[in-house]
Amino acid sequence: MANRKKAELACRSVLAKRERLCHTPSPLANTSESVQCRPLEVQVGDKGIERAIKHLKRKMAAEGILRELKRRRHYMKPSIKKRKKMSEAARRRRKRLKTDEIPRTMG
């Protein structure tokens, strides 16, 4: 039962991410409804299994499944999450300032 709840939470987070990216309303009006995840399918054609695996990896990366798995692999305390979020924002800010300083002579 606990595994099912974890799976439902994972599916909800993926659905929420899709909703944010696509700007489409969620099909689930009530959170108590059961969540059905649509499985990723890849057709293995005459081009071989290697090509199909590559295509599956690409689909998983696009859905954000791999990033979600890496994020959920270890528990992160809320204070560390906040610190990491702030350091990432500072890094992006520094990067943006660095690119703004470079004179654009091309064009």
Image: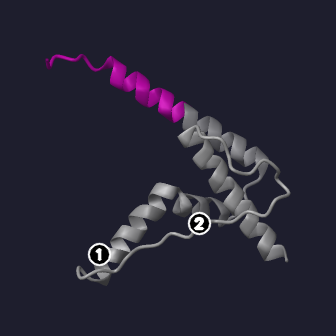
From mark 2 to mark 1, how far is it between C-alphas?
22 Å
Residue in the image at 61% along x and 44% along y: 19
Q: Any magenta on residue 92?
A: yes
**Which quadrant: the N terminus?**
bottom right
Q: Is residue 26 left or right of residue 29?
A: left
Tell whether 41 sits left or right of 33. Answer: left
Reading the image, the residue beneath label 2 is 38
Side of 4 relative to 81 (left or right): right
Q: Which of 57 and 76 is in front in this view?
A: 57
Count all numbered tags in the image, as a single digit.
Answer: 2
Quadrant of the rendered structure where residue 37 is?
bottom right
Q: Quadrant of the C terminus?
A: top left
Q: What residue type is labelled 2?
A: Arg
| Image quarter of residue 22 | top right
**Render colour scheme:** one colour
Q: Residue at x 58, y 37 (%)?
A: 23
Residue in the picture at 41% in, 70% down: 56
Q: Residue at x 24, y 82 (%)?
A: 46
Disc 1 residue crowd, few under 14, some 14–19, many 20+, Cα 10 Å: some
Q: Main secondary structure of the magenta part?
A: helix
Q: Which of 106 and 30 is in front in this view?
A: 30
Residue 14 shown in magenta = no
Q: What residue type is labelled 1?
A: Arg
Q: Which of marks 2 and 1 is nearer the N terminus?
A: 2
Say which element carries label 2. Answer: loop
State the extent of the magenta-drawn residues as a range: 90-107
Q: x%, y% of residue 106?
A: 14, 20
Q: Name the residue under label 1.
A: 51
The percent position of residue 10, horizontal first and vertical second, equals: 69, 62
